[in-house]
Amino acid sequence: MEGLFSLLLFAGLFFLMMRFGCGAHMVHGGHGRHDAASGNDTDPVCGMQVPAGSGYAKSHHGVLYRFCSRSCLDKFDADPQQYLGKEKEQS
Ligand SMILES: [Zn+2]
């Protein structure tokens, strides 16, 4: 009987994990319109691809930029126009 009980408990936990995982993905997909295609944002300072949900994010003029590291965020903070100008030139 104990074995059956723990098996049911395990199955229940597994079911919950599946549901939570699925729900989290759905919420994430709904929110991330900006990075829905690749799942990444480009660090405007060093050009690195930063996966959504990691690194450092900063909102500038209503646009969310993502940075691979704190030092990149600090550089952007010091002179945002320099890095946004660069990005425009490239594209
Ligand atoms: Zn960077």
Image (tube, rainbow, N blue to C red):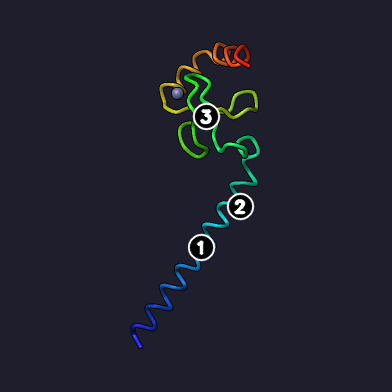
Does 40 appear above or below 45? Answer: below
Residue marked by disc 3: 66
* Image mark for residue 50: none
Observer-side mark, 3 or 1, equals 1
Instruction: Report whether the residue tagged 2 is closer than 8 Å to ligand 1.
Output: no
Q: Which of disc 1 and disc 3 is earlier in sequence?
A: 1
Dot 1 beta carbon under 8 Å from ligand 1: no
Circle 1: residue type: Met
Q: Is residue 88 above or below residue 61?
A: above
Q: Secondary structure at mark 1?
A: helix
Determine the quadrant in which ligand 1 lies.
Answer: top left
88 vs 67, left or right, is right
Q: Amino acid at mark 3?
A: Arg
In the rendered image, which quarter is residue 41 located in? top right
Packing grade of label 2 (10 A; few <14, some 14-19, many >=20) is few
Question: Which mark is on residue 26?
Answer: 2
Residue 3 locus on image (x, y percent): 34, 83
Which comes before the other along the chain, label 2 or label 1?
1
Give the residue number, with chain letter if any, for mark 1: 18
In the displayed structure, would residue 13 be above or below residue 79?
below
Secondary structure of the residue carrying tag 2 is: helix
| Residue 1 x, y percent position in the rendering | 36, 88
Residue 90, quarter of the rendered image: top right
Q: Quadrant of the C terminus?
A: top right
The first of marks 2 and 3 along the sequence is 2
